[in-house]
Image (spheres, grey):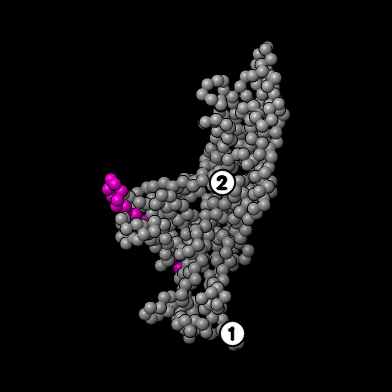
């Protein structure tokens, strides 16, 4: 059937990020006439949530036999019966029966999350599934599925930090510094470079919130004659020349995940380009941010001896924001993940990049809205840890692998990609 063909079941549910503890509401439109033609005798809705992990294990030295171990930790398992044949009918003149539903999210749910590495990975997933039961041989049930993104509710301290950031940070700042000695070859005198990142002095940074920062780069040339001025060499600046545009910097968020399955531990890593995800909604904003030019100081001459020799010091300053639309830092029974913020200033030559990296804790930034749903505090939240479209992850995990492999407790076939199924 095409998308324009009337369907017996339609799920009405607002698609935005939900907060743990929130009451979620929606409705299912059942076209009773079409349901009768399709032999649907009962309508129900299922709310499922689970943490699912999988890791590989080679059973011989050649790696010809691989066992994939899986583990699932249930988080939510709720069912509501919406309609039974003959129990309710549409209003006169209509074929559609509106079946409302409501679920209460537990307050201690971990955030939605997904990661995958080489034959290993894990997910924290939540989903709604409407099921139209069709009894009888060779009659598959009708299903309508929807992934739900969930984040923890922010504490009062986290909410205060979020509000302070949104209205212009007026609190304390902290500096993260790094310096390197640089030279263009394996011989010769060293030049120097320093980088300082200034960010709000917070123990945790709220996700999907603009975080202001200042990034300063200072370089000093090796000792040279004063006649070798920086501005006299267009196209070939004196080494090391600081960057003059934000696009010349590498700004990434690095995530490390520990995956556990019944005593077996593996690790996966992800790297996210912060310049590419500053605004997932506004591509033009991203283009403008990438083109921002730095505030460049005038070169400063610093004498080193009486022979008119010294060094040139140059400095540039970037002021902007970054945002983290990812799952807050969290630890579960079989999944842990942490983040590191990394800035890299590239310079010509092997091993000359100046890298500044430090751990950063991401936290919740949205309150739990009161029931009924009203206008949730998370309705405008941008979130990137969303599972892909297709069969939704829930309580049963199945991993398809090649014919030369086996798995614990299940038969596997062909495709090496993980596939998730509802129960």
Residue 273 has which mark? Answer: 2
For label 1, count other residues whose C-alpha is less than 10 Å away and answer few (under 14), some (14-19) or many (20+).
few
Q: Is mark 2 on a helix, strand or loop?
A: strand
Q: Where is residue 354 in the image (x, y as percent from the top left)?
A: 56, 33
- Assess disc 2: are there few (<14), some (14-19) or many (≥20) residues with their C-alpha within 10 Å of its C-alpha: few
Q: Do the residues labelled 2 and 1 touch (CB within 8 Å)?
A: no
Between 202 and 255, the one nearer to me in the picture: 255
Q: Is residue 24 visible?
A: yes
Disc sitting over residue 355 in the figure? none
Question: Which stretch is magenta?
Answer: 59-78
Return the disc, 2 or 1, that comes first in the chain's sequence: 1
Q: Where is residue 254 in the image (x, y as percent from the top left)?
A: 51, 44
Residue 65 belongs to the span the image colors magenta: yes
Vertical placement of 389 versus 195: above or below? Answer: below
Query: Which residue, as the protein is rendered here, is positioned at the far right?
Result: 298
Which type of secondary structure does the marked residue at label 1 adopt?
loop
- Prevailing SS of the magenta stretch: strand
Name the residue at 31% across, 52% down: 66
What is the number of the mark on residue 94?
Answer: 1
Give left or right: position of 37 versus 206.
left
Q: How many marks?
A: 2
Q: Distance between the residues labelled 2 and 1?
A: 51 Å
Image location of residue 188, percent across then percent down: 55, 20
Query: Could you say which is closer to the camera, residue 221 or residue 212?
Result: 221
Q: Which residue is drawn at 55% across and 60% down?
A: 18
Q: Which of 347 and 143 is in front in this view?
A: 347
Residue lying furthest top: 306
Q: Which quarter of the picture shows residue 28?
A: bottom right
Residue 315's quadrant in the figure? top right
Nearer to us of marks 2 and 1 is: 2
């Amino acid at each position: 059937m095409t998308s324009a063909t009337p369907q017996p079941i339609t799920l009405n549910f607002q698609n935005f990020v939900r907060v743990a503890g929130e009451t979620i509401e929606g409705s299912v439109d059942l076209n009773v006439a079409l349901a009768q033609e399709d032999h649907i005798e009962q309508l129900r809705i299922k709310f499922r949530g689970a943490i699912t992990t999988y890791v590989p294990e080679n059973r011989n030295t050649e790696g010809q036999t691989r066992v994939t171990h899986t583990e699932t930790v249930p988080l939510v398992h709720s069912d509501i019966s919406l309609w039974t044949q003959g129990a309710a009918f549409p209003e006169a003149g209509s074929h559609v029966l509106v079946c409302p539903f409501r679920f209460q999210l537990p307050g201690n749910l971990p955030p939605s999350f997904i990661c995958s590495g080489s034959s290993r990975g894990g997910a924290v997933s939540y989903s709604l599934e409407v099921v139209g039961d069709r009894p009888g041989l060779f009659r598959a049930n009708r299903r309508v599925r929807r992934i739900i993104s969930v984040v923890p509710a922010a504490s009062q301290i986290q909410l205060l930090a979020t509000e302070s950031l949104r209205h212009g940070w007026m609190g304390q700042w902290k500096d993260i510094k790094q310096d390197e000695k640089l030279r263009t070859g394996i011989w010769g005198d060293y030049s120097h470079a320093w980088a300082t990142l200034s960010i709000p002095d917070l123990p945790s940074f709220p996700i999907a919130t603009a975080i202001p920062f200042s990034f300063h780069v200072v370089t000093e040339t090796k000792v040279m004659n004063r006649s070798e001025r920086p501005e006299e060499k267009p196209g070939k600046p004196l080494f090391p020349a600081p960057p003059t545009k934000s696009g010349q910097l590498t700004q990434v968020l690095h995530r490390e995940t520990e995956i556990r399955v019944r005593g077996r531990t593996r690790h996966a890593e992800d790297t996210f380009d912060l310049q590419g995800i500053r605004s997932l909604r506004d591509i033009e904003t991203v283009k403008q941010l990438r083109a921002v030019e730095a505030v460049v100081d005038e070169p400063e001459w610093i004498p080193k001896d009486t022979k008119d020799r010294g060094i040139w010091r140059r400095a540039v300053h970037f002021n902007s924001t970054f945002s983290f639309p990812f799952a807050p830092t969290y630890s579960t029974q079989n999944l842990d993940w942490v983040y590191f913020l990394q800035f890299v200033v590239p310079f010509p030559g092997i091993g000359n990049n100046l890298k500044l990296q430090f751990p950063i804790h991401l936290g919740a930034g949205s309150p739990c809205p009161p029931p009924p749903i009203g206008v949730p505090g998370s309705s405008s939240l941008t979130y990137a840890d969303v599972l892909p479209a297709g069969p939704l992850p829930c309580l049963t995990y199945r991993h398809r692998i090649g014919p030369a492999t086996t798995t614990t407790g299940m038969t596997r076939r062909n495709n090496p990609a993980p596939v998730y199924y509802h129960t």
